[in-house]
Structures are given as structure tokens and as C-alpha cells.
């Protein structure tokens, strides 16, 4: 291999023993974490550095981290990292046992204060060991890096000296985390392809410029051969990158097909048998799919944690939002089977939702504009009382989902004040708020807009790992909903 990697690129590992080295213009300490799929250590024994030079499958030899993949505990992966005396670019390499360079990666701190850098991930994918260039930095130095991977440290100063950490914790991979890991893999694979294609184009342009640099010889046979060699190298590099991306996408598509039937309904596709046979609660809800149309047909579910920790604003023309809002509401109700629904819809924009969720309604839907203030005021007062009750006893009433549809029709300035009050008081997890429509031209509405998480009906978003651009397509409630009723009708409502 021996190639220069870019962040996100992955490749098969052709050896059973790999040696990680790093150099920079400042003093460095190399270290490694043995982590689970959630990137968390199981205990302090899973960290390798100069005060603790060995664990199963990983050891420190001088300034080199050595990983024997056959000795790493089953199901684990290894993160290779460095701590720097001060922010600096770091050159890293992975070599085999004989010292032959397998891959290299140049890591630039993203900001001027990052003094801890994750460089490489060594992981197993379908019985094959692979490597991936990472490049994530931590402005909080080793203290932040250790904490991010489940290691407890006594103080930042202790961690900055790489002092022996305290016990770590095991965090299981939930269904929501499974889908986010698949999205992360897709994002890094797409970024690797894009980076390789840009590099190929840059090298091709340089080689063509060199081939025609001498005006007297640019039409000679040797110049033609140089252009042909440049084209061949470009085609080969892009071809390899495309093949690697296609292979990654095929693996991820197969994973999605496999896991869909095992997901709880709130995260599964509408055609999943989970809606009929697997009425399980969920830590997240599916809100749509992301795709990179220029890179292929792969579609990745986009999910949010449940219950919502801040208001979700579904932005767009209220007349067009019905299927999207209804989809989000059905999934939020399914995620927490004891959730009660308060529906405020002065514009009657959600006709399909009411009969489907009748068993979960906490009271009649509000359609009359004159009844909006009383319902909001009552919910705000209830949220205040619930917040007081939680200070005494964590066991309180059922969680609440408040859906406010049809903005800006039917809501005035005082209504918006009550909505802010509900959203802020209920942010501890008992009250989830979904707003739909265009934001009103109101100062309080700006506060809500700023505090809310936005879900565009269509558009683009950037993934959080590489900043790659993805096209977002929101989920819509299917036309046939009979198979969804079982997952929505199981809660017991008050008399």
C-alpha cells in the first residue's frame, strides 16, 4: 500500500502486526485506546501509554505503538493517537513488523488549540481487519480525549501528563447508535472518495502542465506519451477510489437491510415487520434519509434522539407539511408508548393524523383559534408543576408530546410566550415540542427559532464527521396506515 491517506479513507490491513509511529516539530507522546463499537474503553487497562505500556494485543515499544490484531479482545477496535506539547502538524505512519510503510497520514490541527489528535482506527469489518485515517482533534488536550472515550481522569493536569487514568465504562450500542455508526461509515467513505478524486485531478493537472511546459516540444511524441501516462494514472486512481466506494456502499446497504427488521418501529422503515410484530420503545426516531446523488444510490436513515431535548421545527409551507409532520409524530409516540399527545392545529393541516393517534390524544385537538391560548396556558402551568414535582420525586406523570401545526396562522405574541415557557420548562425530557410551518414575524418567534432544531422539508445538510454535503429527504406518513395502528394503541389513558 504505502499510500498517503486523507481523513476518512479506509483500506484492508494486509498484515497481522502493525506499528504506529508519529513525528512533529514538537515533542509527542503516542498512545492507544482499545474500545468497543461505541468508541468507549471497558476499563483503565484499555489505555496504552508510557505509564502503562501494554494491554491485550497492544503495546508500547519506545515511541512506537505495536498492535497484534489477533491478540486484541474480540469485538474491540484500536484507536492510535498522539498528545502534543503544543498545537502542531503531525506526520503518522502505519508499518508492518519489518518496518515497511503500509500507509501514511498527515494530520493538521483544525483549530489553533488542539494538542491531542486521533490519527488511526484499526478495526474489524466482516472478519476482515481494516485501517482508517481519522484526524479528529481535541482542544481540551489529552484530558478531553481520555474523557471522550470513557476514561475518568482526576484532573485535566493529570491527563495532560498522561497519568494513570481511572476506570472506564462500557456503553452498549443502541439501535440509534447503530444507525449513526452506519451514517458515519458512509460519510467517511464518501469523503475518502471525494478526496482521492480531487487529488487525482490535481496530480493530473500538474502532470499535463509539465508535459506542455516547453512550447518547442509540446507537439512531439514524448509529450503525447507523457499526457497518455498522466491520463492513465488519473483513470487508475479514480477507478480504484470508485471501486472502493462502491464496495463500501454495498456493504452498508446490506447492513441496513439486515438491521431494519430488528429495529424498533420508531427507527425502522414503514415496510418493516417491526410495525406489526416488534412494538418496542426506542431511544430515537427516524426523520428521513440522506443521500449523495453524485456518488451513487445509497440512502442512509437520518435519526434524532427521543425524547426531544429541544423543540423540533419543521420548516415549510403548512399546506405541504402534513405527511412529514404526521410521520415525526407517529414515530415519537411509538418511541415512548406511554406518551400522550396534545395537538394544536388551527389550520387543520393534519387530517390524517387525528384518527391514527386517537388512542394517544390527551384531549380533543384544538382547531378553534379562540381555544389556542387556554390550551397553551394550561400546558405551561402543568409543565411548571411537573418541574417542581421532579425535584421531589423522579416518578412523575406520563411524557407529553405537544404538536403545534400551521404556523403562523392561529398564534399570536402571547401564545408564543407560552410556547417558549413550555419548551424551556419541559426540556428535562418529559415534554417534547414539535412546531410546523413558517416562523411568524415576531421577536419571541425568533427566540423559538434560534433554540429549535430545524428539519427542512427538503434541502442539504452537512454530516458532523467530515462536513460532507448530503441531500436530505424527509420521511412522510404512508398512505396506507392500518399496519401502524397496533404500535399506537397500547397506552392506557386517564378516564
Image: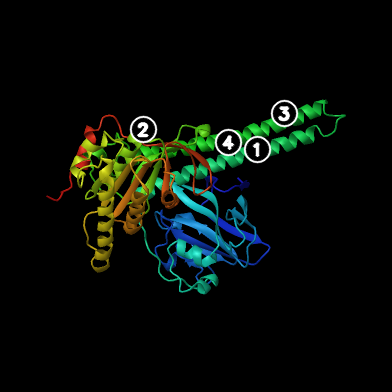
| Residue with the mark numbered 2 | 319
Nearest to the eye among marks 4 and 2: give it: 2
Q: Secondary structure at mark 3?
A: helix
Label number found at residue 228:
3
Instruction: Work out whether 494 lies above or below 244.
Output: below
Instruction: Work out whether 295 lies above or below 390.
Output: above
Q: CA distance from mark 4 to mark 3?
A: 18 Å
Query: Within 10 Å of the Cα at label 3, are there few (<14), some (14-19), or many (20+) other Cα atoms?
Result: few
Q: Secondary structure at mark 4?
A: helix
Query: Within 10 Å of the Cα at label 4, are there few (<14), some (14-19), or many (20+) other Cα atoms?
Result: some
Q: Measured from the top left, where is residue 181 in percent x and y?
A: 42, 48
Instruction: Work out whether 114 lies above or below 320.
Output: below
Q: CA distance from mark 3 to mark 1?
A: 14 Å
Q: CA distance from mark 1 to mark 4?
A: 11 Å
Label number found at residue 240:
4
Q: Does residue 410 appear left or right of residue 203 in this picture?
A: left
Which callout, 4 or 3, points at the residue further toward the start of the chain?
3
**Residue at coordinates 57% horizontally, 57% vertically from top-left?**
19
Q: Secondary structure at mark 2?
A: helix
Q: Measured from the top left, where is residue 381 in percent x and y?
A: 26, 58
Instruction: Work out whether 196 lies above or below 399.
Output: above
Residue 404 occupies which quadrant of the picture? top left
Please tell me which residue lies in front, 89 or 223: 89
Q: Measured from the top left, where is residue 366 in percent x and y?
A: 25, 42
Please tell me which residue lies in front, 98 or 491: 491
**Residue at coordinates 40% horizontally, 69% vertically from top-left?**
167
| Residue with the mark numbered 1 | 200
Amino acid at each position: 500500500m504505502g499510500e498517503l491517506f486523507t481523513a476518512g479513507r479506509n483500506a484492508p490491513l494486509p498484515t497481522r502486526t502493525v506499528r504506529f509511529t508519529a513525528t512533529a516539530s514538537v515533542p509527542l507522546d503516542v498512545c492507544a485506546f482499545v474500545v468497543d463499537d461505541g468508541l468507549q474503553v471497558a476499563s483503565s487497562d484499555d489505555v496504552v501509554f508510557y505509564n502503562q505500556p501494554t494491554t491485550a494485543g497492544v503495546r508500547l515499544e519506545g515511541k512506537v505503538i505495536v498492535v497484534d490484531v489477533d491478540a486484541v479482545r474480540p469485538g474491540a477496535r484500536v484507536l492510535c493517537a498522539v498528545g502534543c506539547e503544543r498545537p502542531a502538524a503531525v506526520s503518522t505512519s502505519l508499518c508492518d513488523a519489518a518496518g515497511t510503510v503500509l500507509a501514511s497520514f498527515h494530520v493538521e490541527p483544525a483549530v489553533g488549540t488542539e494538542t491531542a489528535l486521533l490519527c488511526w482506527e484499526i478495526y474489524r469489518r466482516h472478519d476482515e481487519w481494516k485501517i482508517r485515517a481519522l484526524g479528529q482533534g481535541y482542544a481540551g488536550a489529552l484530558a478531553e480525549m481520555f474523557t471522550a472515550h470513557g476514561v475518568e481522569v482526576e484532573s485535566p493536569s493529570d491527563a495532560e501528563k498522561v497519568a494513570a487514568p481511572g476506570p472506564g465504562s462500557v456503553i452498549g450500542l443502541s439501535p440509534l447508535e447503530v444507525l449513526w455508526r452506519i451514517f458515519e461509515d458512509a460519510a467517511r467513505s464518501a469523503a475518502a472518495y471525494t478526496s482521492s478524486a480531487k487529488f487525482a485531478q490535481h496530480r493530473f493537472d500538474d502532470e499535463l502542465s509539465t508535459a506542455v511546459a516547453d512550447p518547442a516540444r509540446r507537439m512531439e511524441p514524448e509529450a503525447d506519451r507523457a499526457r497518455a501516462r498522466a491520463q492513465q494514472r488519473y483513470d487508475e486512481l479514480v477507478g480504484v477510489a470508485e471501486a472502493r466506494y462502491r464496495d463500501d456502499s454495498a456493504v452498508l446497504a446490506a447492513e441496513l437491510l439486515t438491521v431494519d427488521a430488528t429495529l424498533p418501529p420508531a427507527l425502522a422503515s414503514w415496510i418493516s415487520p417491526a410495525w406489526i410484530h416488534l412494538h418496542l420503545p426506542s431511544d430515537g426516531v427516524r426523520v428521513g434519509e440522506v443521500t449523495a446523488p453524485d456518488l451513487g444510490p445509497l440512502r442512509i436513515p437520518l435519526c434524532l434522539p427521543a425524547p426531544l431535548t429541544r423543540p423540533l421545527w419543521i420548516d415549510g409551507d403548512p399546506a405541504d407539511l402534513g405527511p412529514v409532520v404526521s410521520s415525526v409524530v407517529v414515530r415519537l409516540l411509538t418511541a415512548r408508548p406511554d406518551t400522550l399527545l396534545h395537538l394544536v392545529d388551527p389550520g387543520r393541516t393534519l387530517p390524517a393524523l387525528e384518527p391514527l393517534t386517537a388512542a394517544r390524544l390527551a384531549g380533543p385537538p384544538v382547531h378553534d383559534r379562540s381555544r389556542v391560548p387556554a390550551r397553551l396556558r394550561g400546558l405551561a402551568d402543568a409543565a411548571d408543576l411537573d418541574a417542581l414535582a421532579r425535584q421531589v420525586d423522579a416518578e412523575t406523570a406520563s411524557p407529553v408530546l405537544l404538536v403545534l401545526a400551521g404556523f403562523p396562522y392561529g398564534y399570536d405574541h402571547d401564545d408564543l410566550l407560552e410556547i417558549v415557557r413550555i419548551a424551556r420548562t419541559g426540556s428535562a425530557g418529559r415534554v417534547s415540542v414539535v412546531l410546523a410551518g413558517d416562523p411568524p414575524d415576531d421577536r419571541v418567534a425568533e427566540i423559538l427559532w434560534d433554540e429549535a432544531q430545524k428539519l427542512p422539508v427538503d434541502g442539504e445538510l452537512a454530516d458532523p464527521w467530515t462536513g460532507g454535503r448530503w441531500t436530505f429527504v424527509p420521511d412522510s406518513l404512508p398512505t396506507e396506515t392500518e399496519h401502524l395502528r397496533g404500535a399506537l394503541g397500547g397506552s392506557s389513558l386517564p378516564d
